[in-house]
Amino acid sequence: MLHKVFPDKEKARSIYKMALDREKSILDLDNKKFATIITENIYEIIKELATSILLSEGVKAIGENAHKEIIDSLRNYSKFNEEDISILQDLRIKRNKSMYEGKQINFSYLENNKEIILKIIDKLKKIVNDKLL
């Protein structure tokens, strides 16, 4: 559930920095060998960037469906279309199955979606930069 809170730009900056550090940490990993780990981290980067945006606006997601609502909240930005949201929700589901059920994510998923996911990350970073820097 999304709740109104006092805007916390300092916390938003800290989470943004964590996302950038996470992004740097996966650059050197072998995509074929570590597809699951890379995909999980890409999801975390997206979640952290979106969380940073929400915190800067005074919104916090809590509860069982928090991650789904974080992604759904991106509909409020003209940079994101329904295809972007659908891809991110699919990524969230794959990440959850990996994290909680031990299901591996195939390299082909990463290979087929990496370009659009990286574009989404760039869109998120631009919004964060506009709000925080």
Image: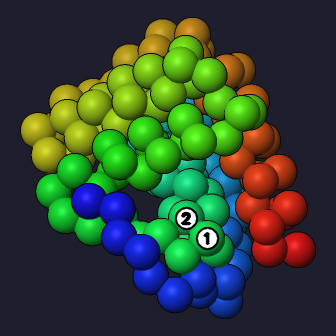
User: Tag 2: residue type?
Assistant: Leu
Q: Which residue is mark 1?
A: 57
Q: Which mark is residue 28?
A: none
User: Residue lying farthest left?
Assistant: 101
Q: Are marks 2 and 1 in contact (CB under 8 Å)?
A: yes
Crowding around mark 2 (Cα neighbors within 10 Å: few <14, some 14 to 19, many 20+) is many
Query: Looking at the image, which residue is at 30% across and 29% down?
Result: 94
Q: Is 73 rendered above or below residue 64? A: above
The quadrant of the image that shows the C terminus is: bottom right
Task: Decide: is 14 above or below 17.
Answer: below
Binning the other alpha carbons within 10 Å of mark 1 as few (below 14), some (14 to 19) or many (20 upward) gives some
Residue at figure coordinates x 74%, y 33% from the top left: 79
Mark 1 is on which residue type? Glu
Can residue 52 be seen here? The reply is no
Tell me where residue 98 appears, x and y as whole percent: 24, 37
Question: Image height check: is 68 above or below 20?
Answer: above
Of residue 3 and residue 43, the one placed in the foreground of this image is: 3
Left or right: 50 in relation to 16 = left
- 66 versus 112 height, above or below: below
Q: Can the viewer see residue 90?
A: yes
Residue positioned 49% across, 53% down in the render: 47
Q: Which residue is mark 2?
A: 54
Q: Position of residue 74 (x, y in %)?
A: 55, 42
Q: Is residue 130 left or right of 119 when viewed as pictured?
A: right
Secondary structure of the residue carrying tag 2 is helix
Kindly state the secondary structure of the residue where label 1 is placed.
Answer: loop
Quadrant housing residue 61: bottom left
Instruction: Give how far across and how far down residue 83 sits, in percent.
Output: 55, 15
Q: Is residue 120 left or right of residue 93?
A: right
Task: Return the x and y of residue 107 as percentages of the image width and height.
Answer: 47, 18
Estimate the spatial distance between the alpha carbons at disc 2 and disc 1, rounded to whole Å.
5 Å
Colouring chosen for the image of the structure: rainbow
